[in-house]
Amino acid sequence: MYQRALQDYEKAWGPEHTSTLDTINNLGFFYIDQSKLVEAEQMY
């Protein structure tokens, strides 16, 4: 869900928009919760 939203936000608003950055942050926390630390680190 977050990955799809991230793709859409980056396409619509660009990588520096606050909604895009919020989604990146949320995706990072999602990966942490799933113990996917390598993926989480890539978000930051």
Image (cartoon, grey):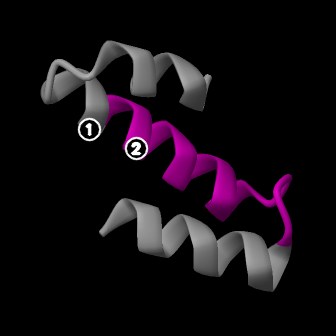
Q: Residue at x 61, y 81 (%)?
A: 8
Q: Residue at x 82, y 57 (%)?
A: 15
- Left/right placement of residue 16 relative to residue 30 reads right
Tell me how far mark 2 sits from mark 1, CA to CA: 6 Å
Q: Is residue 35 highlighted in magenta?
A: no
Q: Position of residue 7 (x, y in %)?
A: 60, 72
The numbered mark at residue 16 is none
Using the image, determine if residue 29 lies above or below residue 14: above
Check the picture and name the quadrant holding the C terminus.
Answer: top right
Q: In this picture, which residue range is highlighted in magenta?
A: 14-29
Crowding at mark 2 (Cα within 10 Å: few <14, some 14-19, many 20+)? some
Q: Is residue 31 left or right of residue 44?
A: left
Amino acid bearing label 1: Phe
For residue 40, what is the image quadrant? top left
Give the image location of residue 22, x and y in percent: 56, 49
Residue located beneath label 1 in the image: 30
